Amino acid sequence: MSASAAVVGAGVAGRLLALKLRRSGYEVTLFDKEPASSLAACSFAAAGFLAPLSEGGASSEPLMVRLGQRSLPLWQDLLPTLPLPVQLGLKGSLMVAHQPDVSALQERFARLKRRFPMSPSEWVDANRISQLEPALAESGFQAGIYLPEEGYIQSHAAMHALQQAHSNEGVTSYYGTEVRHVAAHRVVTTQQTLSFDRVFDCRGFAARSDLKDLRGVRGELIEVHAPEVKLHLPLQLIHQRYPIYIVPRGDDIYAIGATCLESESLGPVTIKAGLELLNAVYQVHPGFRFAGIHRLVANCRPAFNDNLPQVHHQPGLWRLNGLYRHGFLLAPVVIDLLLRHLAGDELSDDERGIFIPGAN
Ligand SMILES: Cc1cc2nc3c(=O)[nH]c(=O)nc-3n(C[C@H](O)[C@H](O)[C@H](O)COP(=O)(O)OP(=O)(O)OC[C@H]3O[C@@H](n4cnc5c(N)ncnc54)[C@H](O)[C@@H]3O)c2cc1C
């Protein structure tokens, strides 16, 4: 008989894990407190930027960069097996700056070359920028950094495709079902207590009462509808306060993000954040001036102290959390490692580092 697994939380981590467990032969039950149509999960706030290096060159750990680089081919392998189309753009990303911020861009480039000498990155001038991204031909950017091994995923489409794959492949899903307690071999909902061989807690920020060091890092993002803009590559604008990215989402929608605040507030996007994001994008391409505001999003990224993912475990219980700014980037590799850990495979020191024995 197949082993039974419960996955609690249907964000990107829970959805991907549920599918991978099912494909490994488990009888899988997935729980989420929100209805299936809800966009409340942090994963629906994500822009879908897959940027191991540009994120890593800023402040992240080299381990994040190494894991992120391994994740991109995993998305490439997975997407053709899903029942709905999901666009994955892996033609690179561009980092640009207006003239007053070019020195900050140069520092970024020097840091990237110093910290990640084996990872490709190219200093580009105005000609090369317009060759790589014709939509920026009139933008006036004189300098930039091209990172050929970065890209984006249509994150909402990926979430829907994973959900559809669950129904097609026999994952039992209980949306609109709040789980009160997640324990070894046991899931307690508002209605009943259920037993499983293995329980996986993927509740993101909501799991903080069971994961002492977990914190929320607020992020705000704006989606705009800009039919006059035809960007193909995700773009990062280096800016005095924090880098602002613009990620194409398809159908002329662009995600503009994101603030990064040490706050656990889930309140609406503030006027300050909105003005900063929109002001930055207004100067990137004239087509953004007449764009319509499509959606304002604020949520809390789940993060541990070192901003790296962790899997806390004890027999019968695994808590996967701390995907921070990189849920779409890191979920495939972290879940791959989790499945290898379950199968008893030998992991490298790097890989073992994300597993913390002794879940609550
Ligand atoms: C503004 C913003 C922009 C971002 N941009 C990017 C990006 O470009 N690229 C990238 O890789 N990452 C990005 N991220 C980060 C990414 O969104 C997160 O890392 C990721 O969503 C975390 O996924 P998760 O599955 O761990 O948690 P979540 O998405 O939070 O999922 C947790 C799920 O658990 C459910 N749940 C919670 N409590 C219960 C309960 N008691 N019972 C049942 N279900 C429960 C919730 O309803 C939810 O569906 C961004 C984040 C923000 C906020």
Image (spheres, rainbow, N blue to C red):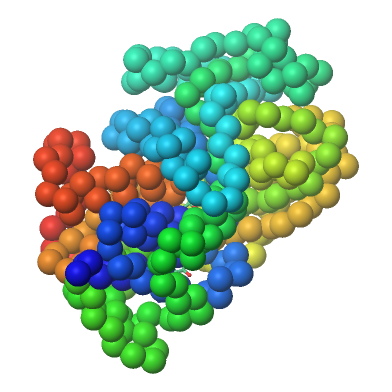
Farthest residue, direction bottom: 191
Q: Is residue 295 above or below residue 151?
A: below
Residue 86 occupies quadrant: top right
Q: Is residue 101 left or right of residue 322?
A: right
Q: Is residue 9 above or below residue 113?
A: below
Quarter of the figure that contains the N terminus: bottom left
Question: In this view of the protein, can residue 58 be seen by the observer?
Answer: no
Question: In this view of the protein, can residue 116 be seen by the observer?
Answer: yes
The percent coordinates of residue 6 (x first, y second) are 31, 70
Q: Is residue 3 left or right of residue 173?
A: left
Farthest residue, direction right: 290
The percent coordinates of residue 307 (x first, y second) are 34, 47
Question: Residue at the spot x=33%, y=90% of the render?
Answer: 192
Q: Is residue 36 above or below residue 160?
A: below
Q: Is residue 87 left or right of residue 57?
A: right
Question: Residue at the spot x=54%, y=29% of the render?
Answer: 90
Residue 38 occupies quadrant: bottom right
Quarter of the figure that contains the C terminus: bottom left
The percent coordinates of residue 326 (x first, y second) are 44, 45
Question: Residue at the spot x=72%, y=57% of the render?
Answer: 295
Q: Nearer the viewer, residue 212 or 182?
A: 182
Count of number-bearing discs: 0
Q: Nearer the viewer, residue 152 or 26?
A: 26
Question: Residue at the spot x=29%, y=35% of the render?
Answer: 63
The percent coordinates of residue 98 (x first, y second) are 68, 22
